Amino acid sequence: MASPLSKFPIDLAKYKKLTLDASQPKLTAEQKSILKENIQLLRDAIVLFTATGAARGVSGHTGGAYDTVPEVCIALSLFEGSDRYLPILFDEAGHRVATQYLLSALQGHIPPEHLLHYREANSRLPGHPNLALLRASSSLLVVSGTCGHM
């Protein structure tokens, strides 16, 4: 069943790139504000496209994807403008696949509207990652396969 939405209703362009330096023990007020806004934006997006899937009868949960958004935002901010880190987010079991799809949309590898078809048959966005489907979708992600099966 197709999503009743044709446009992704959350403006992902509101995500603000932030550069953090791990040698600085405290965030500035501006950094903290941007980080909080980015966390809320990504969490709202995950809840939205997970809920549209549930409304279509292909339910699941936001689970680990929702829970790890703060760490993801911090890691992305540490990666930004630094060659000190290998800019890869590892997902050992596929339980944060919604994060993977969302980052693919943020990076422009898929249009945000594609997220509205999360878990839909033939959408290329299954509830657990398929390596063949993800290879070209993001440069930040490494997964071990569907449900962690190597």
Image (cartoon, rainbow, N blue to C red):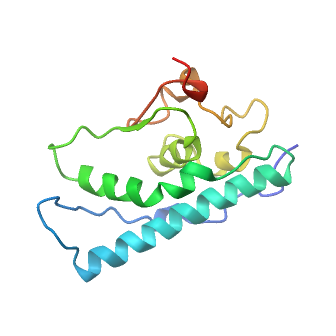
**Position above or below: 132 against 105:** above
Task: In this rendered view, identify the residue nearer to me: 71 or 111.
Answer: 71
Farthest residue in the top direction? Answer: 150
Residue 110, visible in the rendered structure: yes
Task: In this rendered view, identify the residue nearer to me: 27 or 110.
Answer: 27
The residue drawn where x is 53% and y is 32% is: 93
Query: x and y percent of residue 147 in the render?
Result: 60, 28
Farthest residue in the left direction? Answer: 23
**Position above or below: 6 against 108:** below
Task: In this rendered view, identify the residue nearer to me: 35 or 6.
Answer: 35
Q: In this view, does 62 lie to the left or right of 16?
A: right
Farthest residue in the bottom direction? Answer: 29
Total marks in image: 0
Residue 6, visible in the rendered structure: no
The residue drawn where x is 19% and y is 73% is: 26
The residue drawn where x is 59% and y is 31% is: 129
Query: x and y percent of residue 123 in the render?
Result: 72, 34
The image quarter in which residue 2 lies: top right
Task: In this rendered view, identify the residue nearer to me: 34 or 66.
Answer: 66
Q: In this view, does 55 lie to the left or right of 79?
A: right
Q: The N terminus is located in which quarter?
A: top right
The residue drawn where x is 65% and y is 60% is: 47
Q: Is residue 58 left or right of residue 143?
A: right
Q: In this view, does 121 lie to the left or right of 90?
A: right
The image quarter in which residue 44 lies: bottom right
Query: x and y percent of residue 48 in the render?
Result: 68, 60
